[in-house]
């Protein structure tokens, strides 16, 4: 968020197919033409496909096509990326998953060599109350199934986190408070996302907006770093963040972007109980151009040391608690 703003690179275009050669220079019938092995274009994932057909097969297919006509298959819609969150690792994250009761938990897996601990007792009791399957496996097997470096001997598998619609985030928060939202513009580091979500939940953020594409969603690393915050934060996925910010602005939400190159600083922003959304930029590039243009105000966090930036997790924590402080009003 706070690093100096930078440009965003556009999507790279894939190479198209070269037009096929005409009949000129074709090989005699029954002789495969040189250099005519069909090739498949490379996709975004970099995978390639190949495999040619014999001339006889091609002629047969051509005759079949003329006789029966083209067979058209409707394109299958690509499955959209959801929030994720199906695998939860870490003791606090698993405990909050069970406490929240927001989604179905399929099973909890423990390492069979864990020392007694109160949090483990809580997990077992909550799992028993919810009739959740418990398995014990060897430490090596559990760590082989883990997706984080330190699962703390506990893994849970659950239904994906539910998405909410953007408009659902516009309602009042706990106690009737005005919406306090957090939008993340292309954050790709799961550790940073998890840390930001943990800070946001503890500061009273009432909802989070994430891009559906070109951004990290809720991975096991995110759930562990968030320490259970993902279970309590409503989150909306949007196709384009700039368009989503315009919708929020039309609904009366004040949009504040954080960028290290801004002329104004966060401490000078006048905030009380207004509905607000804080927008944090991606690591290294800051706010995108269109995202920045949609902000009502862009501010920086004043720095006093020699380093020129904070990472998005630290900047997000400061910004969220500054809004929370303003909403509490002056200390008596």
Image (cartoon, rainbow, N blue to C red):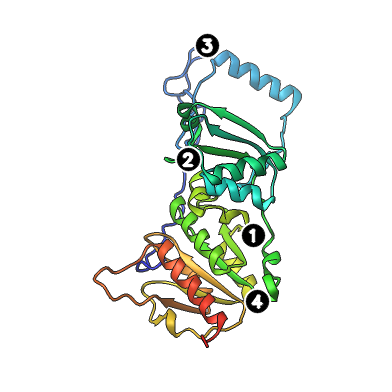
Q: Between marks 2 and 3, how big is the CA–CA gap?
A: 62 Å
Q: Position of residue 304 (x, y in %)?
A: 28, 76
Per the image, label 1 sits on a secondary structure element best described as loop
Of the image marks 1 and 2, the number of the one nearer the N terminus: 2
* Residue bearing mark 3: 30
Give yes or no for contact between labels 2 and 3 (Cβ–Cβ under 8 Å).
no
* Residue bearing mark 1: 234
Q: Position of residue 30 (x, y in %)?
A: 52, 11
Query: Which quadrant is home to the N terminus?
Result: bottom left
312 up-or-down from 154: above or below: below
Q: Residue at x 42, y 67 (%)?
A: 315
Of the image marks 4 and 1, the number of the one nearer the N terminus: 4
Q: Residue at x 44, y 50 (%)?
A: 12
Along the line of sight, the residue nearer the viewer: 293 or 27: 293
Q: Between marks 1 and 3, how big is the CA–CA gap?
A: 65 Å
Q: Between marks 4 and 1, how big is the CA–CA gap?
A: 15 Å
Residue sitting farthest toward the left? 306
Per the image, label 2 sits on a secondary structure element best described as loop
Per the image, label 4 sits on a secondary structure element best described as loop
Of the image marks 2 and 4, the number of the one nearer the N terminus: 2
């Amino acid at each position: 968020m706070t690093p100096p703003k930078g440009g965003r690179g556009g999507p790279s275009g894939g190479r198209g197919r070269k037009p096929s050669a005409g009949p000129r220079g074709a090989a005699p019938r029954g002789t495969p033409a040189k250099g005519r092995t069909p090739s498949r274009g490379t996709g975004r994932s970099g995978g390639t496909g190949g495999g040619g057909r014999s001339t006889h097969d091609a002629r047969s297919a051509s005759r079949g096509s003329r006789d029966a006509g083209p067979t058209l298959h409707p394109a299958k819609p690509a499955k959209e990326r959801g929030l994720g969150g199906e695998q939860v690792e870490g003791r606090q994250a698993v405990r909050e998953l069970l406490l929240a009761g927001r989604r179905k938990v399929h099973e909890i897996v423990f390492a069979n060599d864990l020392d007694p601990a109160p949090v483990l007792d809580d997990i077992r009791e909550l799992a028993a109350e919810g009739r959740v399957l418990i398995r014990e496996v060897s430490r090596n097997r559990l760590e082989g199934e883990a997706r984080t470096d330190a699962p703390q001997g506990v893994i849970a598998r659950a239904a994906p986190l539910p998405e909410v619609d953007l408009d659902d985030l516009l309602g009042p928060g706990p106690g009737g408070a005005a919406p306090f939202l957090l939008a993340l513009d292309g954050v790709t580091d799961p550790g940073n996302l998890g840390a930001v979500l943990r800070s946001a939940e503890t500061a009273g953020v009432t909802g989070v907006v994430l891009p559906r594409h070109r951004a990290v969603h809720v991975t096991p690393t995110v759930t562990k770093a968030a320490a259970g915050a993902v279970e309590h934060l409503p989150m909306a996925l949007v196709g384009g963040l700039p368009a989503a910010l315009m919708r929020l602005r039309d609904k009366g939400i004040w949009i504040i972007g954080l960028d290290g190159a801004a002329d104004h600083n966060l401490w000078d922003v006048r905030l009380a109980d207004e509905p607000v959304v804080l927008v944090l930029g991606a690591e290294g590039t800051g706010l995108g151009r269109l995202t920045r243009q949609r902000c009502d105000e862009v501010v920086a966090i004043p720095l006093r040391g020699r380093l020129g930036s904070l990472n998005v997790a630290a900047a997000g924590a400061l910004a969220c608690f500054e809004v929370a402080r303003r909403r509490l009003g002056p200390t008596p």
